[in-house]
Image (cartoon, helix red, strand yellow):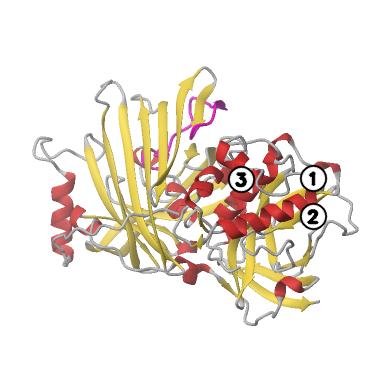
Amino acid sequence: MIDCPITARRSFWPCVVVFIVAVSGCHVDTETNRVDSAEDVEAAVKKTRISKNDGGRESGQIPREDWYSIRMRGAKVGHAVIRVQRDSADTNLIYWRSEEAFTLLRNNDRLQQNMILESWEDKSGRIRKWRWSESSTGVERTCQGEATNGGFLVTLGDGPKTLMPWKTDWRGFFGDYQLLSGMSLQAGQVGEFRGLIPLLNQVGKVTAKVIGLESIDTMMGRQELTRIDFSMLLASQSMQSTYWVDTHGDVVKQSISQFEIIKERTAKEIALAPNDDFDLYAAFHVSLGREIPDVHEKSTIRYRVKRRSGDPLKGLFVDDHSQSLTRNSDGSLTVRVRRVGKNSKIVTSAVNRPTDGDLSGNSLVEVDHPIIQEMADSVARNGTDPMSIATELEALVHRRIRNKNLSQGFNSAATTAKLLEGDCTEHAVLLAALCRARKIPARVAIGLIYFDGRMAYHMWNEVWVSERWVPMDATLGRGYVGPGHIKTSVSNLDGIAPFAAMIPLLQLIGDLQIQIEDVQ
């Protein structure tokens, strides 16, 4: 689901338009009645928000339904609807449901994604159960949690139930909306909560600060709205967004400036209007300003990286045997990437040695699935050298995934083995599963790869052979990885929060600058 080249909010709306595609979508082809003027939009919104039988309810009452249009860099890429009502099975519970749908291009491959968030809460706001589902191109991923003593029993896909510790005052997916409904909206007021982040299945600390009234352009014309700056702290990383709300505290407009994403309340007719063609890959790759011929044959490359925002880079890149970091006085970082093979003279510290999760199966890397076992045993059946076996498995994945495209979201290894199509994430999870099936510890590496004078977001593998982690990339199928890869994190994708490994990368998308210092 990362935008790798193939040649080779709810509190932060469903994980930022589902990780800028690890990032959401569904194109609506039905004809709609277009509403063009601000006056028509405002009238349509009022009609949508006030039903015939609720007596002209005030903001915050239920049932309610709000529609939103979502734009990225000015292009319409999707829509959202939030519904709040009493649960039909238990009227003591409030049922929240959000649906977001996107259509995005990735290097001209069309990706359609949908995300649904559901939460059942009592009148005090305590969550009784929750569920999220994300689908792309017909493949669905689900996760649900049910309250129990001490937390939630969480089931990711077909995986086992796992206890997630929980405190009673923590919020769910809709904590931002609930926080706003209880604030006075006076300039300088600060509110905060800890809330569940969809996809990541982790709790983040969210802080909201009221800035004051601003006159801003909206789809309903120019309005006086209250600006509120939100900050979410998760895994020591912070992300910012801005909300503009009306006098009732209802969200009219949201913005994540880093990704140039705008989510704005509008009429249902406009929310469901056809999307524009927006190429995510073209928008978010990182230009280098020069090309590096035969990049994967080089031994060492030094990159200088910094953030456009000037924010620190601490914790956003890996410092290990394959790449080293040097902090510069101007706040930038020099990343020296080395080519690593099974015979490289390196020493790996004990902390980086394989764990049980690097060899076992999980919801994305289904080691014990029959299709994985069969594929893993189809090469080097009598082989005993782990590096040779891993190399043959890398070549197998490269060869068998015939339809190398960017139309898939983030399929599991077993799904990839069935469909035999996808991008770097599909190659990486499949190779990880095959290596583990042959008792070779394997994990995924997340970061960037060089491609035609630019860096694209990417996922590849590392396998444990000869007492070291050796990188492999099935999208390239070379049997080795040169210094054209920059690593931001590594993960075995285990547990109920496999996508949390992408948090460092999420910080960098749209905010990263890279220069080449030296090539050897």
Q: Nearer the viewer, mark 3 or mark 2?
A: 3
Q: Secondary structure at mark 1?
A: helix
- Is residue 335 magenta-colored? no
Rendered image quadrant of residue 370: top right
What residue is shown with label 1?
352
* Mark pair 1, 2: CA separation: 9 Å
Q: Secondary structure at mark 3?
A: helix
Q: Nearer the viewer, residue 462 or 397?
A: 397
**Residue ID at (88%, 58%):** 343
Earlier-in-chain disc, 3 versus 1: 1
Please report contact status of discs 3 and 1: CB closer than 8 Å, yes or no: no
What residue is shown with label 2?
320
Give neighbour class at mark 2: few <14, some 14-19, many 20+ (Cα, 10 Å). Answer: few
The location of residue 327, given as percent across then percent down, is 77, 64
Image quadrant containing the C terminus: bottom right
Amino acid at circle 1: Asn
Q: Nearer the viewer, residue 326 or 444?
A: 444
Give neighbour class at mark 3: few <14, some 14-19, many 20+ (Cα, 10 Å). Answer: some
Q: From which residue to which does the magenta span run? A: 156-177
Earlier-in-chain disc, 1 versus 2: 2
